[in-house]
Amino acid sequence: MSDAVRTALIGGIFALIGAIGGAATTGWSQVQLARQKFNSDLVLKALESSAPEERLESLKLLVETNLLQDAEIQKGVRAYAEAKQKNPSSIPQVSTAPILGAPVISNPRIYLLAGSKAKELLFTSYRAELENAGYKVLGAKLLNDEKRPVSEEIRFFNPEDKIQAEKIAEFVKFKLSAPQLEATLHSDSSAKPGYIEIWFGK
């Protein structure tokens, strides 16, 4: 299993664990429902990869690390993975990723920013996806700015761009398996409507 898939899967796992923790404060029945959803979401997460071999390895990881908390589900996943060992291509791919739809504002202009060389590697793929969806990418820059947060952030500078920025934030959050990513309004009189920044963190 590739490092990228392993990272995405583990990131999703921690996000789901957080959801269970929140549910625990509202009563036992909701905790039980959250646990069931936790198990099913883990399996779905394991089936997201476009590579059959990686889907198989992700299922094995869930079983070998005892992340599935329901004994029956764990038993079923183990049996399924063993049965598909010789034919991983028969394991269906399940995609729950939000689609980056066409812009909902006129003249959307995106600038990509990163605070480290590692995060800079994201520029190429995100530029392609944004442009294919109809956004104009003005540029991409490695920025060593102490005022920028360590984690990811979507910045917009005009209130009318809020909905668009939130849609981009949802897309990037899923892609990076970020536990939290919000679109935030910042003040900059030089930023015209439609201008949005994607900050990939440090």
Image (cartoon, grey):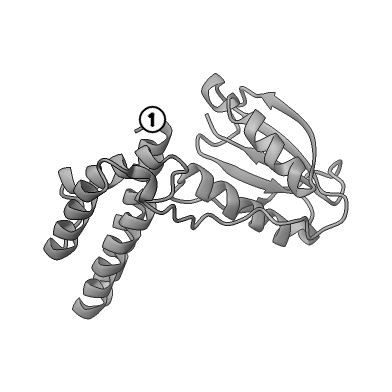
Q: Position of residue 69 (x, y in %)?
A: 17, 59
Q: Is residue 32 visible?
A: yes
All told, the count of numbered labels is 1
Q: Nearer the viewer, residue 77 or 11?
A: 77
Q: Quadrant of the N terminus?
A: top left
Local crowd size for mark 1, using a 10 Å CA cut-off: few (<14), some (14–19), many (≥20): few
Q: Position of residue 56 (x, y in %)?
A: 31, 43
Q: Residue at x 22, y 50 (%)?
A: 83
Question: Which residue is labeled 1 in the image?
Answer: 3
- Name the element at disc 1: helix
Q: Position of residue 112 (x, y in %)?
A: 69, 34
Q: Residue at x 20, y 56 (%)?
A: 68
Outermost residue, front side: 86
Outermost residue, top side: 117
Q: Position of residue 152 (x, y in %)?
A: 55, 40
Instruction: Locate residue 150 relative to residue 165 in the image: left or right.
Output: left
**Figure check: 122 above or below 40:** above
Q: Is residue 65 visible?
A: no
Instruction: Locate residue 25 relative to residue 108 in the image: left or right.
Output: left
* Amino acid type indicated by mark 1: Asp
**Figure check: 67 above or below 110:** below
**Figure check: 26 above or below 91:** below
**Figure check: 21 above or below 93:** below
